[in-house]
Every structure is written in C-alpha cells, then in structure tokens.
Image (cartoon, rainbow, N blue to C red):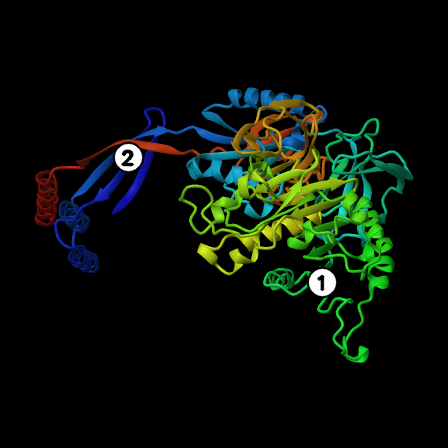
Amino acid sequence: MCLICWIGWGNKMTGTLILDPLIPLIMLYGVAGLALFALVLAIWRRLPGWWLRGLAGLALLLAIANPSIQQEDREPLSNIVVMVVDESASQRIGDRPSQNAAAIANIEAEIARQPNTVLRTVTLGDAEGDLGTTLMTTLSAALAEEPQARIAGIILVTDGRLHDIERAPGLPAPVHTLLTGQPDDWDRRLVVENAPAFAILGEEVNLTLRVEDQGAAPEATSVPLSLSIDGDTPLTVQVPVGQDIQLPLTLPHGGMNVLQFTIPEAEGELTNRNNAAVVQINGVRDRLRVLLVSGEPHPGERTWRNLLKSDSSVDLVHFTILRPPEKQDGVPVNELSLIAFPTRELFLEKIHDFDLIIFDRYRRRGILPSAYLDNIRSYVEQGGAVLISSGPEYGSAESIYRSPLGQILPGAPTARVFEEGFVPQITDLGARHPVTEGLDALSPNPDGEGPGWGRWFRLVDVLVPQDAMTVMSGLDDRPLLTLNRIEEGRVALIASDHSWLWDRGYEGGGPQLELLRRLAHWMMKEPELEEEALWVEPTGQTMRIIRRTLSLDTDDVTVIHPDGTETILKLEEVSPGRFETLWEAPEIGLYRLSDSEETTVIALGPAAPREFEQTIAGAELLEPLVEATLGGVKLISDGDVSIRTVREGRPANGRGWIGITPRDAFRTAEISISSLLPAWAFLMLASLFIVGAWLREGRR
C-alpha cells in the first residue's frame, strides 16, 4: 500500500513509502480504532500526557504496519516522432521529389534540435497491383512497431491522395501533414465511364468517355481524341472538355480487342500518364451459321450433324440429297419431298449469311448449277469458308473438284481410292498447326507407339498444291487433311469419309470430335486457332509471352513500355511451333509487343493507374484526422516549418510551426525496498512515550 511518493530527477531516483503490515489489514484497522478510542477517552477525561499516550499508540501502530521505502532507479526514454514519406507514383511527378527531399531535411534538422527526441522515418512506395497509395496501412504498421506511450507526434509528407483512409489507426499524438504540390498545378485526364466486357461482332456498341480538367487548368473547349485498336493506325476526333460523350464503335474481329484512347499532353499539365485509357472488349459472334450439304446418306453424316448441333451458338442448315434426279421409279412428283431444296435462295441470295459451308460426300448431279458453285468460289475469296469431306465420289467424274470450285480446293483427285486400313498420322507441319497441335495427347492410348487411335479404311488420293498445308497424312504418307487460305477466305479437304470410325470407338476410336471442332473453328477464323499469333497471358505483373508459328524458329520480341522504353526478349521453344518466355513487367500500364511479323498489345491494370486518377495535391481526406488531434496542414511550397513542444490537449499548430507533445516515458532499471525503522526502534519510541506519560501523570 503506497502512502507517499517523491521523485528526484537529478539522480533519476524515485521514492515511495509503502506499508507491509505484520497482521491482516482489517486487524490493523481494528487496532488503530482501539488506539483512537483510547486517545479520545484520555482527551475527554483530561488526562495529563494524553498526547504522549497518542504518540506511543502511533509508534506501536507503525511497528505493526511495518513501513518501508521503495526506491526506483528510472531511465528516461526518448520521445518518438513518426514520419511517413509518400514516394508513390503520384509523388514522382513535377517537382514533388525535390519537395519530399526538402521536407525530410527540414524535419530531420528540427528533430535533432529537440532534446530527448528521435525520428522514425518510413517510406511508402507503390503498392502491388493497382491499390493506389496505402498511406494509412503504412502508418498503422509503423505505429505498431513503436510503444504508444512514447509517440510524441506523427508527420505525413504526401500529396494527400491516398486510397485507404478507412484503415486509419488510433492516433496517440498530434498528426501533421506536409503537403507537396504547387498552388497553380493543373492536369487533364481521360476517363472511360462505361465500356462493356463483351460485344457482338457486326453490332455497334457505345462507350462513354469524358475529358476532365483538374486544378488551375486553362480554359479549353475541346481536345483531339485518338482511338487505335490493337495498335493499328489511330482515328482522331474532336471531343468537348468536361462533358460525357457517347462513342459508337464496331469491333473489327473476334477475340480480345484492345482499344486505346489517348489525348495529347498539354503544355503545363502535371503528367500525361492519365491522358490514355485502355479498354479490352471480347468480340463474340452472335450466332455461327453453318450450311451442311450431304450428297447422300452414309454413316458419317450424323457425326457432322451431332457436332454442329451440340454447340448452342451454331445455327445449322442441313440438306441431304436422298434421291438423285436420274433415279426413275415411278414415284409421283408430289410425293418426292416434303421441303423443296431452295438452291437459289441459299447459294445466290443468302450465301454471305453463312460462316461455313460443308460439302459432305457431295457429287455433281445437276442439283447445283455451275453458276451456283462459281458463286461459292467468290464467297470464299471474299472471306467465306468451305470444307470438303470427301468419299469415293471425289475421285470420280462427278467430283465437285471438276467444277468452278476446283480452282480453290486444296487437293486435286488422281482418281485412285485406297480401300485398306491405315492409322492417321500428324505431319511435322501438323504438329505445329493449332488444328492438330497436341491432338495425339487426346488419343485413347497416348503412351503407345505413334498415335494411339484406331484405323480408317478409305483414302482418296489427291495432289496438293505447294501453298496448301497438309497437317494429317494417311496411307504411305499421302495427304489426309489439307488446309489452305484463298485470298480472304479458307478451304479445307478431308480426303476420307471414315472419321466416323473414331466416333464409334472402333479399335479404341480417336479424338474425332475435337479434330472436327478445331477444324470448323479455324475455318471460321476464331482467333485462338490462328497459326501465326503473338499473345500475352498476364498474371499480376508477370507476362507469359507466347508466339505460335509454323516456322522452325522465331524472332526476338520487342516490348515497348508505357513510358516508351524498349526491352528485347528472346523466346524459347516449349513445343513444336510454340515459343514462350516469362517476363516481369516493371509497372502497370499498356505494353506493345512485336516481332518481325506479329504485333499485340496488353494492358497490365489500367493504362492510367489509380495513382493518377487525382493528381492535384489536396488534404481533404486527411483534414478530419489532423483536426481531431489538433495538428495542422502545411504546404511545403511555403517554406520550412519549425517544431515546438506543447502540452497534451493544447493546439499543436501555428503559423510556421507544428507541435509535438513530450510523453515523459521512462524505463525502471532497478527497485530496492528498505524498512523505514527497525521494529525495535518503534518499540523503544513507544516505551519512551509511555514512560514520559507516566512521569507526567506522576508529577501531576
């Protein structure tokens, strides 16, 4: 039990009088009460020497209370001032780096003049990803490492543009903000308010954009806006400043379309990092329309139908010629067909509505005149696609090759048809082509010798032109699957009608469905099946750069950074026709990649990161914290500030100065306890007082 304390600052010693009773405390209170009662009785009876009796009782009580002196050797601890310096991306524009350096030097000099005070400096850089300035998160971590009882002040050197104000910690001392920037700063920013993630090819989509000025911007009514898609030649239009505009756009191709919008850098604005915006829109086809013409019923006909009907995005028009015109069996004409074959409508009027035309074992019987087939040839040259799945008829006099279509087909029949078993093989070129690349890994027996799939039993012998690509071979390495590009369109020839054996599981079957799916999608120009392609798969700021080519090697890739600098990367072959490398991008933004043939663009995060959404310095977000702790906001551009000490609870901010509150914290180095007097001394005092009282009474 402490009765009295004193402190000696000169020797850093403190003393405390404590009691350690020899009997329980409640009994001590009882004895004290009896002594007090005896004293009052003596006073009431006017006994001479009553005060000597009282002193004797007090001496006995002190002996029982056992008073001791507790001495503490205290070492004063220094006051801590925490300074968080914002060095994020927005603090690297204009003259802010030099302002940061000046503020740090100013605070370090002022703290050095304060007695018993140390400075803890924490630097805040760019957060991972696009989190912006995490000033409060950094401050919380810094405060967690220091004893709260020693924090005398908190100083934030920042532009005030933070993105985690909701994470503000408890603040044990005055908070001051030293604000970078200049009063006449201004900036221009491009904002994409609304952009869809998907858009249908051929249909117009509207994007909402706005050009806005911040700070002390000069008056402007409009600025030029440039739009480029996948790094192509940009289109420039004038747009008003400070108004939302609707920009109609039609995507040029399927797959990912990277749209970059830019406005020119104006003289005097802080940065051009927010003068660009990137939007990635995936172009999808509304419906894929396929026309399937079967020359006659056969076991593989249903395979094509099942494949195309299994895809809900495919609209299939299928006609099968059940009865050739030359057949004479006396059946009345009105009973020959439920639906007339609309050849003119399909092959003249609406042919361009189809994305793919498949001729499955079709032979010339006069149903499609040569003018219609010539129109199909023109359809291919203008961007259409034709696939021939051939049977024995392809090598006969009725072959569709012996029509205007023969000018574009990738295989000329020799009239030889082989009726013997063979295992389809992927050619060296096919191992690199996306239609057949890795197809052998999908076979029922991928660990066996050669492709682990079943045999086919028919092959039409064809001669392939030099510009065609044979990706699969059959008997004696003869062409089995041949592809070719004809001007804007594509053609393919399967020199057999026995792919259905894989579907039926004969001898284990094979990846027939995957092969035909890839083939159909390649012909409909799906981007993921282009044989020459360069693309990037980002993971955070790590790029996996992939180059697919039919060549045996590839050139180095040049990466153009958001700031215009370049990096040249060498790619390594990881599988036939596929070259890759991993590269860690130094910052988020828009990157352009190119080699001698292919180019692509990739946006890591937004082209204008969150750091550059607001670039004009301002303390609006920090003012509530500063005011709650009686701190202040000072502009670094106004000059240096001085630091003073103030009492806790007093304003810590004035003209040209900021305040810190000394905490008087200490560490106890040693504690010693000694008795005030020995017990026998108290007993002797009590005896003396009792004898004195007896003598006084006796003299009376």
Type of amino acid at the residue the image marks with label 1: Asp
Q: Residue at x 72, y 66 (%)?
A: 321
Return the residue at label 2. Answer: 15
Q: Is residue 648 left or right of residue 213?
A: left
Residue 45 image label: none
Label 1 to label 2: alpha-carbon separation? 96 Å
428 or 642, which lies in front? 428
Type of amino acid at the residue the image marks with label 2: Gly
Q: Is residue 655 above or below residue 472?
A: above
User: Label 1: how many residues lie within 10 Å, few (<14), some (14-19) or many (20+)?
Assistant: some
232 or 654, which lies in front? 232
Q: Is residue 58 visible?
A: yes
Return the disc, 1 or 2, that comes first in the chain's sequence.
2
Residue 202 point in image, percent of width and height: 80, 53
Q: Is residue 389 above or below residue 683?
A: below
Under circle 2, the secondary element is strand
Return the residue at label 1. Answer: 315
560 or 170, which lies in front? 560
Residue 615 point in image, percent of width and height: 72, 35
The quadrant where residue 357 appears: bottom right
User: Label 2: how many residues lie within 10 Å, few (<14), some (14-19) or many (20+)?
Assistant: some
Q: Are marks 1 and 2 in contact (CB under 8 Å)?
A: no
Residue 534 point in image, percent of width and height: 65, 35
- Tell which residue pokes out farthest to the right in this image: 221
334 or 331, which lies in front? 331
Q: Is residue 131 visible?
A: no
Residue 320 point in image, percent of width and height: 71, 66
Q: Is residue 447 above or below residue 224?
A: below
